[in-house]
Amino acid sequence: MRSDISRDLTRRELLAAGLAAAGALALRTPVNAAPSAANEAYGPFKLGLQSYSLRGYMAKGKPDVEKALSITKDLGLHYWEAYPAHLPTTSSADEIARYKKLTAAHEVSVIGYGVIPFTKDHEANRKAFEFAKAMGFGYLSADPSLDSFDSLDKLVEEYGVGVGIHNHGPGHHYALIDTIAKVIKDHHPKIGCCIDTGHFLRSNEDPVRAAEVFGKRIFGVHLKDVKENKAATDVKDRMKFTVLGHGDLKTAELLKVLAGLNYQYCLALEYEENVLNPIEDLRACLNAVREAASTLKKS
């Protein structure tokens, strides 16, 4: 934690202190607050990154969180759904304070976290919720085992933190819209779906339909695109991640549905390709989001 500020701070130090304080205030912004002016190009959404997109930047053998935050700020984005390797789960008050100071310094609010597993181990599950509450996350994107839901029902009620089941690709238990809908039907309304648009496309599912089906039970959106290559003979080559707007995702239609739902959690751009240098591709993705968001004003 920071020590008392002396009276002889330099002008640079005072400026840095002011920026950090502003960032700290942003971290305390409620999840249903309106996006900042800097985010207006993306419509009514908290457009940010799933920080997994920046996993290729390493320092001392670990994902470089400072580099990832710096890139996020340079891209003009202010929200994260954090990849756990960037901000490992901790119960340490000092570590949590360090995380908050670090993200605030880069003007990034971490409003979601995942993807994390849940099991029937209630106390292990609780640790994730304790961390989420301390950090101010609105939701956790998750891959829960089928025997974890009794525990999750209690924890989402106790902590007020949503859980979005993250759909993975073909063959995964949560690959299909109707499977997830059936699993969550009789559980707490704060248990829903984190819509990964790319993985739904890979599973021949429509992400727009997913938004319509899950409605107010959408906790997190991973915005990414996939292009089907019908000529490919190998099934592994048939569905490929690509730059947003170059694939099969109906981005404008998806945003229209989310806007109609008054979706307030992170709309997290996630780009899985070009791991070592994704920045220009991310910029192209952001251009596609801005173009899609501009159609909201016309409709």
Image: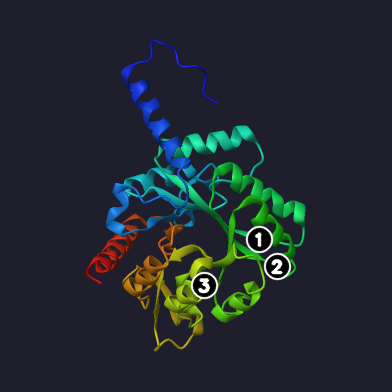
The residues tagged by marks 3 and 2 sit, at their Cα atoms, a distance apart of 20 Å
Which secondary structure lies at badge 1?
strand
- Disc 1/disc 2 C-alpha distance (Å): 7 Å
Q: Disc 3 and disc 1: Cα gap in Å? A: 21 Å
Disc nearer the start of the sequence (3/1): 1
Q: Residue at x 48, y 78 (%)?
A: 202
Name the kind of residue labelled 2 in the image. Answer: Ser
Mark 3, Cα crowd under 10 Å, few <14 / some 14-19 / many 20+, is: some
Q: Which residue is mark 3?
A: 214
Q: Residue at x 57, y 77 (%)?
A: 175
Of the numbered discs in the image, which one, if any, rests on residue 145?
A: 2
Q: Secondary structure at mark 3?
A: helix
Q: Quadrant of the N terminus?
A: top right
Residue 117, labelled with which disc?
1
Mark 3 or 1, closer to the camera: 3
182 w.r.t. 136: above or below: below
Residue 285 percent coordinates (x, y): 33, 63
Looking at the rendering, which quadrant does residue 242 occupy?
Answer: bottom left
| The C terminus lies in quadrant | bottom left
Q: Is residue 134 above or below residue 18?
A: below
Answer with mark 1 or mark 2, whichever residue precedes in sequence: 1
52 or 22, nearer to the observer: 22
Name the residue type under label 3. Phe
Mark 3 or mark 2: which is in front?
3
Identify which residue, 111 or 188, lies in the foreground.
188
Are the residues tagged 1 and 2 within 8 Å (C-beta)?
yes
Q: Nearer the viewer, residue 176 or 299?
A: 299
The reply to whether dot 3 and dot 2 touch (C-beta < 8 Å) is: no
Which residue is farthest left?
Answer: 298
Give the percent coordinates (x, y) of residue 26.
42, 41
> Relative to residue 136, is residue 226 drawn left or right?
left
